[in-house]
Image (cartoon, coloured by chain):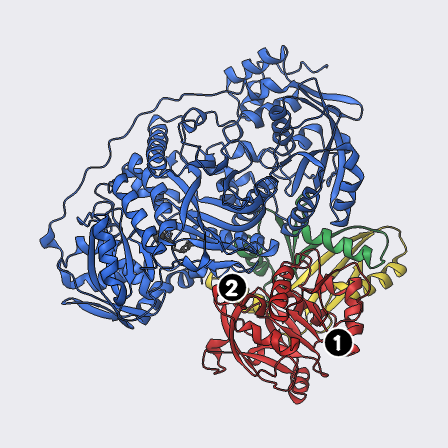
Chain colours: A red, B blue, C yellow, D green
Amino acid sequence: MKSHVIVFPGSNCDRDVAVAIEKISGSAPEMIWHKNTSIEHSDLIIVPGGFSYGDYLRCGAIASTSPIMHEVVQKAKAGVPVIGICNGFQILIETSLLDGALIRNNSLSFICRDIHIKAENSTSIFTKNNIIAKMPIAHNEGNYFASTETLKKIKDHDQIAFRYCDEHGVVNEQANPNGSMENIAGILNDTKNVLGLMPHPERAIEINLGGDDGKHIFESVLN
Amino acid sequence: MTSTWIHKTEQSLVESHGLKHDEFDNIVKGLGREPNLTELGIFSAMWNEHCSYKSSKFWLKKLPTTGERVVQGPGENAGVIDIDDGDVAVFKMESHNHPSYIEPYQGAATGVGGILRDIFTMGARPVANLNALRFGEPSHPKTKHLLAGVVEGIGGYGNCIGIPTVGGEVNFHPSYNGNILVNAMTVGIAKKDKIFYSAAAGIGNPVVYVGSKTGRDGIHGATMASAEFDDDSEDKKPTVQVGDPFTEKLLLEACLELMKEEAIIAIQDMGAAGLTSSSIEMASKGNVGLEIDLTKVPMRASNMTAYELMLSESQERMLMVIDPAKEDMARKIFKKWDLEFEVIGRVTDTKNLVLNMHGKEEACIPINILVEDAPEYQRDYTISEPTKDYTIDPNSLNAETIVDDLIKMISHPNLCSRRWIWEQYDHMVMADTIVRPGSDAAVVRVHGTNKAIAMSTDCSPTYCKHNSFEGGKHAVVETWRNLIASGALPIAITDCMNFGNPEKPEIMGQFVECIRGMTEACSALNYPVVSGNVSLYNETNGEGIYPTPAIGGVGLIKNIEKTKTIAFKKIDSAIYLIGKTEGHLGNSHFLSIVQNQEIGSTPIINLDEELKNGKFILELVNKDLILSSHDVGEGGLLVAATEMSMSSGIGVSINTERKNHAYYFGEDQGRYLVEVDAADEQKFKQVAEDHKITIELIGRTIDAYLMIQDIGKVSVKDLKSESEKWFPNFTR
Amino acid sequence: MLAKIHITLKKDVLDPQGKVIANSLTDLGFGGIQSVRQGKYIEIILDGDDKNAATVKLNKMCEKLLANLVIEDYSVEIN
Amino acid sequence: MLAKIHITLKKDVLDPQGKVIANSLTDLGFGGIQSVRQGKYIEIILDGDDKNAATVKLNKMCEKLLANLVIEDYSVEIN
Ligand SMILES: Nc1ncnc2c1ncn2[C@@H]1O[C@H](COP(=O)(O)OP(=O)(O)O)[C@@H](O)[C@H]1O
Ligand SMILES: [Mg+2]
């Protein structure tokens, strides 16, 4: 099992995700600096959370043009599993690996709290554990938006990975923390090997941190 | 040197630099000539209250600053304490009051940026931010804008750089209507043998500037922080600094990367008074001189003068003295992080600060006159009589209103849930937050270990106003209790002394008394001061703020499994009150919130009792005899019990002998509520008896309701929604 | 050469910020506000004085980085 | 009535975003960039057709809410 974590100058969840992967899989991922241009054989690439370039201009925009992202896109197209978490999700969206856009939370404020998500697609490698999971979100721009056609397309192709829900798995407006269309918390590409999600599974890997539901998402890929 | 153009007749120039006449005379005496403008600017920056501590130094020396675990006390960028295994915690609190009043977002953001640099300058990786905030009354027209801006600014900076903001406090009081307080605290972790200091050394060694370019930001910021506000101050706006948290993140990583090499001889962040204070601090500590070529300073604006370069407060910059053999390696690291790296000068043996620009000498000042000759005042002070006690007629209060009064209290801005604030802060990044905001202390694990540090900030300004001595004691003790209640061994504090104009004897008297109170508490609890900050002249149009010695306490939890939170853990546990309850309603939240009057005396703390009860709690923690614990503070017993319920959803049925307001809402000191598993009750009582601790069974946990026998009940869900609605409604 | 770039949200894209600004303005007593949309305004100072070449370049900058064409439109203007 | 409002940072105020955008454009191979400054562009649709009255109102909006006069300048234009 060989995994890689991409590190941008303003990434700040890179260490957290590396700790989580090592804890779950037993082997530490390799950290890849954004100025690198290639990644050798990889079983999983993670684009972590943070503020890659301060979130200046648009979240993820500047990072998406970095040399390493060109390689990540190639790998993704070749079928390598890729997960973008929070800012990583924003970056994957900006590279067009994933559809739609992430705009300002409808509250206009940063939100850091535990939420629940529910796996919608149960066929992808990331969602086969089919869970209702509690984990934190921490973002300013996690409000998922897609045009009517795009939304139809991702639904038709079963690309919605997770939706925000309440603790019992009910998807409703109260459970939507940021205004995302149809409570979308995470989506897949059409070949289902690329996942982007706003919640932070790497912050939910042990009871001491408030819960370990995040493990399921990694376990379903790592095992 | 040609400029002898300042004549004493040009008093306005001297005055506009905030210097008194005799201070100016001392400059002339020290230099043997009149200073030029650049030099005048340097003296003005160094000798203002903010940098020189001229009114407070004499009194600060009285604080206890040593202890078994103190590695570095006050005097460096931050204090350092030993947390075992070769690890240390590095921490400090700092004010950014005036800038935050002028521009709340940027003022608060750059306050966070500044305190972070103080911590990583010492070689520590910051792991937690806290903030102590005071605003005017909610009905004041500026309060909403200031609150929203400050909270967003703190979050904006901390979230971006990726350091969790895990705690703090906030109060509203009319005394802050025209002068809010924004105090930011950062805690970092380092290795004990890898701490970096600021003393320059090695004649000829390069002085290196790193970080952002210098612009005309905040010129005279440090002087402004020491001047009273008047109605014109809002026009002094163009000097506001803008924070760049992304660059700070780069600077943090670059500095920590370089610190792994043996390259840095001295390092100092550029905070207030930028290049001036950092260069002088380094030279003075190292007892050497510095020669700087200002032409080399990376500049953002064109045509900057020596004066502007020396006084600019552009953010995200550092000054270092490095080993010349490591210069190329160091440069490479900073280039990798896209930061400026320029050798701007050398260490000299002249003991002078010499500034050149375009081949011309712009200043030459002996360091010792800047530092040792800095003014120090023992200002006159008068101590106000503590406010007298006030006895409330027990018959005037009807016990039937207790539940309604409780709801009024927990939904009041000074006692309600702060969730709206801390949900805007990323309090979990770095994945080591063991106890999140909303409990007594925040608890953050030392990465890769099984131990943690606990942190809390506190101060009750109304206590300090009505009895500055007891108020000073209280602020220290309250943080201590919060650490204890979390299961931590309290180790040391940092302080941020926010007061009015020290030239007024009654304000100076408040300062003196608060220091005396803090000193007593710190000594009794073996809880020394390792760093701090003083912010004076917090006044608007002659009205001083309430004395506000904000305290930040840090403690150690050796095994995170022993951490305690305020949340009830299960149904059917016994709830015990530790400590004596007389029913002290003077100067309480009950009176201020429910009766709308600020009267009566500040409660008195018995430090022996305090120590005894605190040690008892720690013993219970060690013996695993309690499930949860909470200190009884603002609002008294019933508010504390309610907080434990709200934070868990578990209810409590209270059945006590005394059933009156004074009992339920009195703010007697030295008390805790603990939850004891029914199976452990006997053992618990035995330990209490062994230590002669006053305990009182007040009730048992139940499902979902707060019930007070013979008085009334209310659901925990309703309490929670009452407690959580004020902030969102106010800021909508 | 000074280039002025306007980046605006596409018509059917939700603008939470614009909506909140509109509400706040109304709350402040400003009547008659039908809608508010917030966009970006970027000023770039470029070397040289070939306006045509610059226009081509600026359009590319917008497409590659400055605008997100999924949700945004842009316009370029050179003084 | 469509009003266009530009909000820009005052001259000497640091623009962290502009700096990062300039670097990133240069990294992408766009040469000759001297500086980038990022501001806001707000479009407001207002009832009525009295341009003078609207201008007064829009200036007030900028001062009260839209612009942060401590660090920003603004300009108003009505079509
Ligand atoms: N400005 C703030 N920022 C972050 N957390 C805060 C802030 N103000 C209060 N809190 C958190 O809310 C909780 C309650 O605060 P407070 O009422 O001051 O507690 P206590 O009385 O126990 O000291 C604490 O966990 C505290 O850290
Ligand atoms: Mg407490």
Three-letter code, disc 2: Cys
Q: Does residue B398 sit above or below B511 in this rendering?
A: below
- The kind of secondary structure element at disc 1 is loop
Query: In the image, which disc is placed on residue A112?
Result: 2
Residue B222's disc number: none
Is B261 displayed left or right of B644 in the figure? right
Residue depicted at x 29% and y 58%: B674
Q: Is residue B636 left or right of residue A65?
A: left
B723 left or right of B592 in image: right
Q: Chain of mark 2?
A: A
**Residue C31 appears in the picture as rendered:** no
Q: Nearer the viewer, residue C24 or B635?
A: B635
Q: Is residue C9 above or below residue B21?
A: below
* Chain under callout 1: A
How many residues crowd around disc 1 within 10 Å: few (fewer than 14), some, or many (20 or more)?
some
Q: Position of residue B187 (x, y in %)?
A: 52, 46
- Determine which quarter of the picture holds residue B721: bottom left
Q: Tell me the SS state at disc 2.
A: strand
Horizontal and vertical percent position of residue A94? 72, 69
Residue placed most toward the observer, B665 or A82: A82
Image quarter where the N terminus of chain B lies is top right
Residue identifier under label 1: A80
- To which quarter of the image does residue B594 belong? bottom left
Which image quarter is the C terminus of chain B in?
bottom left
- Label 2 and label 1: CA atoms lie apart by 31 Å
Residue situated in front as seen by the camera: B451 or A218: B451
Give the answer, above or below, for where B326 lies relative to A156: above
